[in-house]
Amino acid sequence: MSQTALAKTTPQAGAQKPSALAIMAARLSVEPAKLLATLKDTVFQKATDSELMALTVVANEYGLNPFLKEIYAFPAKGGGICPIVSVDGWNKMLVRHSEFDGIEFDFAEDSEGNLVSCTATVHLKNRSHPVKVTEYLSECKRNTDPWNNMPRRMLRNRTLCQAARMAFGFSGVYNDDEAATVVDVTSTPVSTEPPTRLPAPAETHNTGPQKELEALIITEGITFEQFRNYVATEQLVKDADSLGGFDDLATDDAKRLLRAKVGLINNLKKVINPQS
């Protein structure tokens, strides 16, 4: 697909429906063709036309500006592009939601004054009870300069992202720290050439829902092995014992588990921690 074709609108039944790129261009007050060229040269560099279109749709869905570094494009494990939203983007998504009514943060420390956890309380206009999410330093900390030098700020940012996701169901995007599990951070920039792989059924390699399920499970502190054992025991997935990773799940199975994600997570936690 050419840049010109991607930037055009498509006529349907006598009316022109604006493309995702045209919508973003109008939102940013730039010409679609110039926006396309700039995106491909900067923040969405090396993305194919199809990948760029998918990233543009996500940015439009949540009103994010890629030039303000609110959304990034990173190479995903297994090929393709994954949308990563910075903490500024998550905060923007949160505070602009019509039902958002404030957020509070509380830090917990051990007897020696060491940081243990951060709890975010999100108040919503349409609910009688707020949404509370707790993230633990031991589960989130990575051996990087920001985490080593600013653990409270980093844990607060991580908690904000997870609280926003839980409160309003933001899906299809990941935060910076989740890049360690859903993004191939050691790879070179994504090639526009299709990866070489053995022929296989398309439904087993469409990793969109598989990656979303992986992020959901890992974020809750549950390992793949614990997940695999559970779905095998409960016979939720055929031949679950043979799964080597989330990408091996059939797309239909991944989508089905995502639809029941609340019950899935609760049941997994009960099995893993029966005393909790």
Image: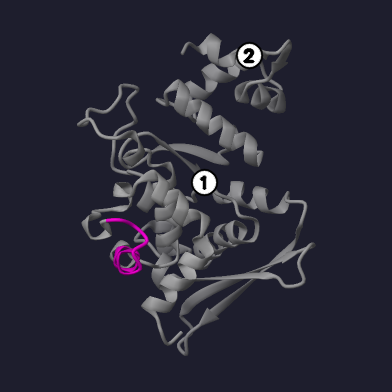
Q: Which residue is mark 1?
A: 173
Q: Nearer the viewer, residue 252 or 8?
A: 252
Near mark 1 (Cα within 10 A), the count class, few <14, some 14-19 or many ≥20, is many
Amino acid under disc 1:
Val
Q: Residue at x 48, y 54 (%)?
A: 258
**Residue 139 sits in quarter:** bottom left
User: Against 130, is 165 above or below?
Assistant: above
Residue 54 appearing in the image: yes
Q: Residue at x 51, y 67 (%)?
A: 263
Q: Residue at x 33, y 52 (%)?
A: 246
Amino acid under disc 2:
Thr
Labels 2 and 1: the sequence-earlier one: 2
- Residue 38 % position (x, y): 54, 20
Near mark 2 (Cα within 10 A), the count class, few <14, some 14-19 or many ≥20, is few
- Residue 98 % position (x, y): 77, 51
Query: Which stretch did the figure color magenta?
Result: 228-238
